[in-house]
Image: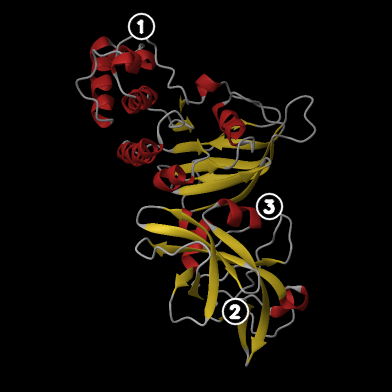
Amino acid sequence: MNAMFLEISQLRVAYAGRGQPVVRDVSFGLHAGDIGVLIGPSGCGKTTLLRAVAGLEPVTAGSITLAGQVVSSATLNVAPEARHVGMVFQDYALFPHLNVGRNVGFGIDHLPRAERARRVAEVLELVGLAGHEGRFAHELSGGQQQRVALARALAPRPRLLLLDEPFSNLDVDLRERLAHEVRTILKAAQTTALFVTHDQLEAFAIGDVIGVMQAGQLHQWDDAYTLYHRPATRFVAEFIGHGVFAPAVIRQVNRQVVVQTPLGDLSDVAECPLPCAFTGGACDVLLRADDIVHDDNATVKAQIIRKAFRGSEFLYTLRLASGDTVMAHVPSHHNHKIGEWIGIRAAVEHVVTFEREAPPGNGKLCRLPCERSVGQAC
């Protein structure tokens, strides 16, 4: 495995007068050419972490290493301009009195005029704005302004590009589309980037690897598929996607581990939690909306207590006879009424269990190694 281009190790960032550090013992790495995304609720510390990587916030413990060079520690803070890091902000920060070409060339004015003009044309071509050099910011759409800001950040060929919620001022549809476009641009430029957002669709669209933060801590640093199907903590399970926690019991039946749920037994357990992992085998099992299938012939029935139309599908919230609640994605031509009882069955390909009644954000994912034989003592 290649060495990490950006490496964060046990990082802490604290402000005077604050009881807890804003960033607490965060560690992760990013390979050259990859796009990392930090996601989490407002106030979780993701922007502070980004500013620390940029050199705009000193760190109180741990270190930040960029291309093998330590640039931040408790005793060292390399100046932002010496880090060769580019940054794209929420408000684009374009100069209204300068045209597009001069905005993009602002950070490379040390280059000879002809070379500067070539680089401006090159990055404008890269972001799909070739020929717009003479236009001004007020003449551009929001998406075009964002691409100008990206071109300006790329022009000096930064070692690392940082993006702080750059699409937050755009409408929802444009945000996701532009995230795909920006990913294409960054990959074409072979740029390593770290992106901050609170929008899951943006994170999934742009990121190679995604970190979920809460209260200054990094809960998981993984690809989108793993975050969704194998959340490392209860908080990640709640924050990513739609789903509920249902009471369950892990049992050993004929030397096979099964998870007994209100929807029946789940036996296709890819990884093997053992009954002794939880007191009495009692746990909570994560049931995603796409784990629940509407089936008129199913023996388990559930009452629709809420429905949300999503175009091609409904998101139904369902109450079982036991009183437990689940959610289900159902094709929109199955337009059932609230209060109606429908048949459902579980189709869970990734069984994920947590300690029963664990506080949100502090749950522990139990996935014991599969090579441990069923029934072996923990």
Give above or below for 12 relative to 79.
below
Position of 7 with respect to 332 (left or right) is: right
Say which mark, if any, is on residue 97: 1
Q: Position of residue 298 (x, y in %)?
A: 48, 81
Q: Nearer the viewer, residue 300 or 27?
A: 300
Q: Please report the residue visible at 33 percent of the width from the left and 14 percent of the height from the top.
A: 138
**Labels 3 and 1: the sequence-earlier one:** 1
Query: If the image is split into quadrants, where does the C terminus sit?
Result: bottom right
- Which labelled disc corresponds to residue 123? none
Disc 3 marks which residue? 361
Q: Which of 30/196 is in front? A: 196
Compare residues 19 and 172 and report the one nearer the observer.
172
Q: Residues within 10 Å of mark 1 (few under 14, many from 20)?
A: few
Amino acid type at circle 1 is His
The amino acid type, in three-letter code, at marker 3 is Gly
Mark 1 falls on what kind of element? loop
Say which label, 2 or 3, has the lower sequence index: 3
